[in-house]
Amino acid sequence: MRTGRTHAGRVCSLLALLSFAAFDAGAVEVHLQFGALERMLSKQVFTQDGRKYVKGSQKTPCNFAYLEHPQFQGKDGKLVIRARFSGRSSLNMFGQCVGLGDAFTVVITAAPVFQQGNVALAGLTVASEGKTGFYIRRVCTALSSSLARDFRYPLAAEAQRALEDPGMQPDYRRELRQFRVPEIRVTDDALVLVVDFELTVK
């Protein structure tokens, strides 16, 4: 009886997998709630004690810049990210950091796009929230270019890892093909990805 139950369970799992793999009614919408998106990016991007260094590291205390504590929201169809910026651009003179530095909240506004397997940010702008000054303006300008270049979430790779995971159905190898995201929308509480792909079961 134990063997029978195991076999039946495998058949049911396989049928579910095959029905999913054969699904061909068009693209599927994936709604990423902002809370989940914050946790995902914390694991993928904000990896250094919850920080994303855009300049230097923990080993350069007089010359660094990092973002932390990202919070997401949607506004007018754009993705808005608030994060805490801390930075310093100075010289180490006799054990003292001499130069410019500050900490403030930055507001990053962008349109999410799918490029080369990654969710990236297009039309990105960065502004401070409630503070101004020469150093802050220079920081916002530098962040605009660096985040547009470096801010990537490897959605295609993550989908491939999850859907081809041999631990889910070890007897049936799966292959993800033609993974596409033809549309991304931003709502008041989520990032909506329209996902289209083929899953081959072998």
Image: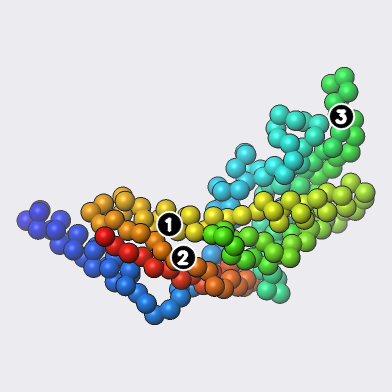
**Which is more N-terminal, label 2 or label 1?**
1
Q: Nearer the viewer, mark 1 or mark 3?
A: 1
The image quadrant that residue 91 belongs to is top right
Q: Quadrant of the N terminus?
A: bottom left
**Which is more N-terminal, label 3 or label 2?**
3
Mark 1 in CB contact with mark 2 (< 8 angstroms): yes
> Where does residue 38 sit, x and y in percent of width and height?
59, 55
**Which is more N-terminal, label 3 or label 1?**
3
In the structure shown, which secondary structural element does the residue marked by tag 3 occupy? strand
Q: Which residue is drawn at 19% across and 59% down?
A: 10
Q: How crowded is mark 2: few (under 14 residues within 10 Å), some or many (20 or more)?
A: some
Q: Residue furthest right?
A: 134
Q: Name the residue under label 1.
A: 160
Q: Which residue is drawn at 66% across and 57% down?
A: 71
Mark 1 in CB contact with mark 3 (< 8 angstroms): no
Q: Distance between the Cα atoms at labels 2 and 3?
A: 48 Å
- 145 or 140, nearer to the observer: 145
Q: Mark 3 points at which residue?
A: 91
Q: Residue furthest top?
A: 94
Residue type, mark 3 in image: Leu
Residue 105 at least partly seen: no
> Where does residue 181 sit, x and y in percent of width and height?
53, 69
Residue type, mark 2 in image: Phe
In the structure shown, which secondary structural element does the residue marked by tag 2 occupy? strand
The image quadrant that residue 82 belongs to is bottom right
Residue 179 has which mark? 2
Residue type, mark 1 in image: Gln
Q: Nearer the viewer, mark 2 or mark 3?
A: 2
